[in-house]
Image (cartoon, rainbow, N blue to C red):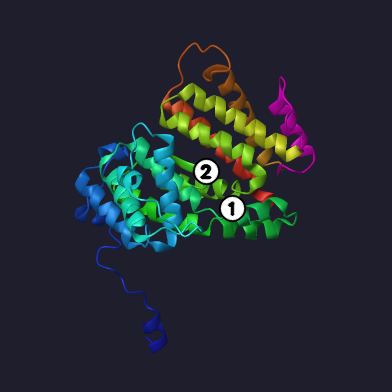
């Protein structure tokens, strides 16, 4: 064996080629809500977020913005009592003094460690939202060139994506059933579906052009999280409808058979990729989405209530269709 071949040999970590090895060190857990995570585990998770550099001076505006949002929105509860009682000193440019920052960190930590899932996810999602650079997002709205729009959107979500990666790693380690994406928190699924379908599709939809679609998808994910399965199916159909309206330039139209007509127009205009292989696929998806709305959504009385599986399949088919249509945008 030559020296070059020897140097190029990959060093194997102990157990890395044994599928069950990781489970022998850290047993796999069933997916669970944040409420079911113990305080000790939450403490480890919080320290990891701190170790990754969040809740420091460079994100103090976002941290304080998230804490202020909680107190303003839920004043009767006043979840951030330390911050509420602290003197609000800033320099006129949104920079707060050390005591105010410490009060915000203390409240963030307590909420993270002690509160139930709804408040924790609201706090994390508000902090994440404030990490999105609104200046670059506005630039994207005004930019016609598609490649430059992508650059602006990428720049706008740079910090957000880093924080989402941190939260998602923590949630994966503790088997929390939520995934932070550019559209907000969504139900965690099989890793392949997350990586190959949800993440790239929601990333592409973060272009401001698709704002109305994102709003509907966020409500769809919320309905699924709250186990409102017929509403989930209704929102999924509405998301496809809104997407097609924007795609063919007919935003605001409505009527019977609208999804089918818009899909036909999109294919004729070359806006929806189609060939002899994809045509049957698109026909099946259109038929499925339309029939699910008719039988399992809130649009019409249902003979049997929609189940979790019904809603999940509808969401996956919706994302699959959107991903297929968004393919040309990356060219």
Residue closer to the observer: 68 or 117: 68
Find the magenta span and give its range. 249-274
Residue closer to the observer: 279 or 316: 316
Which labelled disc corresponds to residue 183?
2
Which labelled disc corresponds to residue 296?
none
Tell me: residue 205, above or below residue 131: above
Q: Is residue 261 magenta?
A: yes
SS type, badge 2: loop
In which quadrant of the rendered view does residue 287 lie?
A: top right
Front position among marks 2 and 1: 1
* Visible residue check, residue 161: yes
The residue at which mark 1 appears reads as 134
Left or right: residue 171 compared with residue 314: left
- Point out the image quarter for the C terminus: bottom right
The structure residue drawn at horizontal position 71% and vertical position 19%, both measured from the top left corner, is 256
Q: Position of residue 180 (x, y in %)?
A: 44, 46
Q: Is residue 139 magenta?
A: no
Q: Position of residue 53 (x, y in %)?
A: 37, 62
Q: Position of residue 164 (x, y in %)?
A: 44, 52
* Visible residue check, residue 188: no
SS type, badge 1: helix
The structure residue drawn at horizontal position 57% and vertical position 36%, both measured from the top left corner, is 215
Residue neighbourhood size for the residue with mark 2, other residues' Cα within 10 Å, grouped as few (<14), some (14–19), many (≥20): many
**Mark closest to the chain's N terminus, 2 or 1:** 1
């Amino acid at each position: 064996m030559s020296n070059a071949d020897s140097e190029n040999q990959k060093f194997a970590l102990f157990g890395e080629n044994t599928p069950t090895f990781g489970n022998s060190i850290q047993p796999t857990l069933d997916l669970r809500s944040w409420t079911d995570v113990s305080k000790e585990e939450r403490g480890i998770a919080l320290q990891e977020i701190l170790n990754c550099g969040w809740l420091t001076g460079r994100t103090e505006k976002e941290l304080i913005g998230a804490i202020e949002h909680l107190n303003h929105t839920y004043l009767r509860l006043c979840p951030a009592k330390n911050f509420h009682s602290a003197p609000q000193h800033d320099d006129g440019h949104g920079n707060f003094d050390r005591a105010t920052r410490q009060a915000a960190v203390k409240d963030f930590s307590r909420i993270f460690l002690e509160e139930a899932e709804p408040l924790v996810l609201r706090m994390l999602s508000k902090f994440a939202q404030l990490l999105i650079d609104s200046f670059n997002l506005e630039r994207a709205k005004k930019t016609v060139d598609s490649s430059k729009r992508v650059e602006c959107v990428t720049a706008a979500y740079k910090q957000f994506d880093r924080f989402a990666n941190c939260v998602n790693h923590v949630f994966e380690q503790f088997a929390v059933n939520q995934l932070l994406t550019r559209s907000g928190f969504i139900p965690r699924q099989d890793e392949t579906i997350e990586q190959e379908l949800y993440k790239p599709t929601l990333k592409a939809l973060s272009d401001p052009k698709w704002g109305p679609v994102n709003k509907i998808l966020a409500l769809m994910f919320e309905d699924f999280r709250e186990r409102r399965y017929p509403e989930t199916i209704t929102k999924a159909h509405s998301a496809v409808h809104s997407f097609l309206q924007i795609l063919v330039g007919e935003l605001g139209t409505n009527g019977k058979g609208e999804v089918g007509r818009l899909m036909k127009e999109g294919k004729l205009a070359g806006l929806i990729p189609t060939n002899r292989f994809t045509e049957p696929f698109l026909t099946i998806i259109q038929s499925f989405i339309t029939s699910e709305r008719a039988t399992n959504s809130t649009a019409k009385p249902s003979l049997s209530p929609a189940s979790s599986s019904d809603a999940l399949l509808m969401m996956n088919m919706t994302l699959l269709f959107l991903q297929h249509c968004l393919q040309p945008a990356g060219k």
